[in-house]
Amino acid sequence: MWLLREDALIRKGFLSAILVASALFFLSPNPAISSDDVVGGRHIFEHYCAVCHGKAGKGDGVNAKMLDPHPSNLAGSEVASRSDKEIYDVIEKGGAGVDLAATMPPWGKTFSLDQIKELVAYVRLLQKGAPVPQGVRLSDLKGSEKEQCSVCHVEKGKARQIAPNLGHEGSKFNRDWLFQFLKHPDRVRPNGYMPITKTRMPNFNLSDEDAGALTAYLMTLKEERFSAVSNLDQSEKAVSEGKSLFSDIYRCDGCHKISEKGEGGIVGPHLSIAKARLKPEWIYAWLKNPQSIRPDSPMPNFGLPEQDIRSLMAYVLSLGGEGKPASVDAGSKEELAKQGKELVEKKNCLFCHILESSGGATKVSESLLSQKKGK
């Protein structure tokens, strides 16, 4: 959603349709939606919705073919005939909440009331044929045209985050998996860390010593809030209950694959390596509230009950085997960690990543909202 060309034609197209969309919007105690609000709806749509519904809302996003039934054509006559309140309810409650397909997740615990209204207003613009911004995928870049700078830069000289936060790796990853990943990076998220970008970490051809040092340093970056999960039931019954929740109730397979080449969506990480990759305490915190760890996470906050979280954990942790042992002692020895910290700077890791504690607002990221204000 951040990979946009902000040209004058797009802005004029939005402004010409905003008054109509705002006039149609259902009454609320809040002021009428402004041009900033509709542009905000676009940014939210591009980040969270376009992967399934497509940039123009026609139900042809890159993840659409993975879903049965396919996502709705939001620009078509069927959705256009629905009231603003009906569209609002689908976004807030999800498909299952209004007797539609459960593959449409609920966003009411992720977006604020006003943000959902902004999305509805933007859907109305799409239905009226408003110009659709053209995004740029990192995987499609072939030249060095100036307009492509926005892929990596918010403004001249300022890089944007296009890769995960490294600030809590020691609380998130298992050491052996992290070492092997640094040695041979593979695409964990088929569609990229930022939706639709197909980004992946380059292979820096690290030596065992450098990979060990980086692992040692990253494993020191921990947060106390990721505490061990006690009494986790991983019995066959718990796994079976988790599988049912995963496939039938929450339709997690709409975004995730449970094997590298199996069926499932391409929005989130494939989960065949979850056991080797992730620590149980991090999985628990993520399922409880993804936005408390990554405020702009494309995964909605489902408001999962405690028992459902534990059942889903039992199933996810049953999918993959143990990771390969690190061939070098990549523990938390002080000198090794110091070398790793120096390598983070030397390799310019913070050009793509950030390094800070996790967490933030439980609604949409402030960095996301700042886009609509032109910051």
Image (cartoon, rainbow, N blue to C red):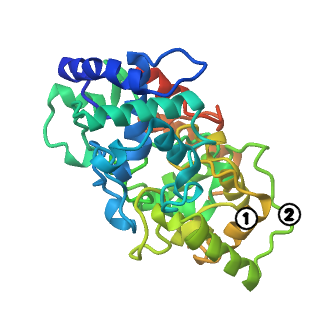
Q: How many marks?
A: 2
135 vs 90, nearest the viewer: 90
Mark 2–mark 1 CB contact (< 8 Å)? no
1 vs 117, nearest the viewer: 117
Image spot of residue 190 (x, y percent): 38, 59
Which quarter of the picture shows residue 187? bottom left
Image spot of residue 62 (x, y percent): 31, 56
**C-alpha distance separating marks 2 and 1:** 15 Å
Q: Quadrant of the C terminus?
A: top left
Q: Which mark is residue 308?
A: 1
Q: Secondary structure at mark 1?
A: helix
220 vs 126, nearest the viewer: 126
Q: Which residue bears the numbered disc 2?
A: 230
Q: Secondary structure at mark 2?
A: loop
Identify the residue at image location x=54%, y=64%.
Answer: 252
Identify the residue at image location x=56%, y=45%.
Answer: 107
Q: Is residue 244 above or below residue 26?
A: below
